[in-house]
Amino acid sequence: MTEMGETSPPREGMPAESSGFAPKLGLFLGPVLALIVALLPPPAGLEPSAMRVAGLFLLMAIWWATEAIPMAVTSLLPLAILPLFGILELKDVAAPYADPVVMLLLGGFIVALAIEKWNLHRRIALNVLRVSGARVKILTAGVMLATALLSMWISNTATSLMMTPIVLSVAVAAGGGPRLAVALLLGVCYAASIGGLGTPAGTPTNLIAIGWLKENAGIEITFREWMATGVPMICLMLPAAWLILTWGLKSTKEQAEAASASIRTQHGALGRITRPEASVAAVFGLTAAAWIFREQLIKVPALSGLSDMGIAMIGAVAMFLVPHGDAATKADGRGGGLLDWNDARNVPWDVVLLFGGGLSIAAAIQASGLAGWLGTYLAGLATLPPIVLILIIVTMVVFLSEVMSNVAAMTTFLPVLGALSDATGLDIRALVVPCCVAASCGFMLPIATGPNAVVYATRRVTVREMARAGFALNLACIAIITLYFGL
């Protein structure tokens, strides 16, 4: 899930607004190329409206990639342009911005805000680390496991922000030197990205894929069905990352005991679980359970209309209704619920708009006939074995996500994958889901993801160290994704 909070660093898959040559070039190049494409005579089989959609899509892709303007603002272009040129009616353009998948994301954001506000995520992480043992390699595994478990449900970037000072203090206490600090810090950012694959709410690209499949292919993937794919991905990728990071890592008995003592000290400082923490844990636990067991719950007549989006909204509303019972907060004059509207202002509304814009332009590509036309020109790829096709797509997306927002990369690729599926006869899920997983595998560069940026900002990890470990992990993940989905 994307990060929350006004003071967070660059959003996951959405690096901070950058300055320099790329945004300026994108600001100029995007409209020029879009206008050229829109005014070209349409080839056989295409209407002029499809060329205008292609021009708009190119403009959005360039502005998303270069961040010429804020990505959320780029996402508003379909609302401004598609009705203006009569390509789609306004209601059809606007509907994707309130798609159930977008509302599911919004509800998940609000639930995660409560977890972060009352510091429940820190307690969960320290409890996992406390039982992970004293050996440094096992400790690194504990750090990565705690990070992955948290990032399944809350922001990958927020998880990294919370875990980074914990592992830094552990590394200092252990006296393991730069090698241990690098392993622990890279373990945090890599595990945050990998853990986000576990649930639909784990990272925006998951929900983009789910929403696109529902809107364009009529395929609905439930929360549990996604977890049936996402959790095995975690189980395969996390050990691979751990092996790469801990290869040759050694520690003395004294260093291991010092690291363990640091964790016990931080855990002890938390004190007993507070009433707000317990209340948040109860609401979150019930929400997660309802997502996982929704297929059984809808068999109850009174709950037959229950959806993943509905569960998210019930959980979100409950966070405002359930009293926190914290005397200090009451004394500040704030609301009595676990959340109040001042907290809700930290919801990343820009990400909500980003989702809507991606789904809206995808709908226009489908409705204009552009997707079908692309399919006819991709028919030659039908001769390739499916596993080779998946390997090509996954490799492209993994390395593209190093320099481009994973959300933008995913949104850009989806219409092409739809056309490719039509051309080759492959199940669309066999292309979209591997592409979605690959979009979260940017491990080489600080700009690739929010978690990478958080860890790099500590100045304890160099670009060379991140790139060396990240390149090896990129290759490992390409192999894992290709074999998992291609065989």
Image (spheres, rainbow, N blue to C red):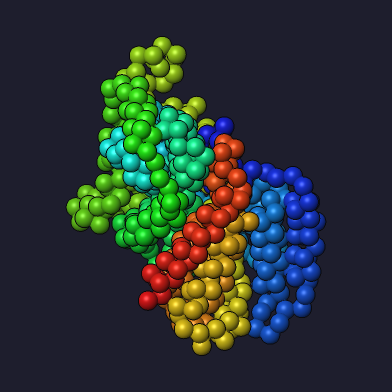
Number of marks in the rendered image: 0
Task: Tell me the residue at 65%/83% (across/down).
Answer: 45
The image shows residue 203 at horizontal and vertical percentages of: 46, 51
Q: Residue at x 56, y 50 (%)?
A: 466
Q: Residue at x 28, y 52 (%)?
A: 292
Vertical order, 371 against 140 (above or below): below
Can you give x and y, in whole percent of width and height, for residue 179 in the image?
Answer: 49, 43
Q: Nearer the viewer, residue 60 or 487?
A: 487
Q: Is residue 108 left or right of residue 392?
A: left
**Which residue is most to the top?**
331
Q: Is residue 248 visible?
A: yes
Q: Is residue 60 left or right of residue 448?
A: right
Residue at x-position 53% and y-position 71%:
393
Q: Please say if 341 is above or below 415.
A: above
Q: Quadrant of residue 91?
A: bottom right
Q: Is residue 87 left or right of residue 285?
A: right
Is 105 drawn above or below residue 408 in the view shown?
Answer: above
**Residue 134, image x, y percentages:** 31, 37
- Residue 169 spot, x, y in % from top left: 45, 30
Residue 27 seen in the figure = no
Q: In which quarter of the view is residue 363 placed?
A: bottom right
Q: Nearer the viewer, residue 455 or 178?
A: 178
Q: Which quadrant is the C terminus positioned in?
A: bottom left
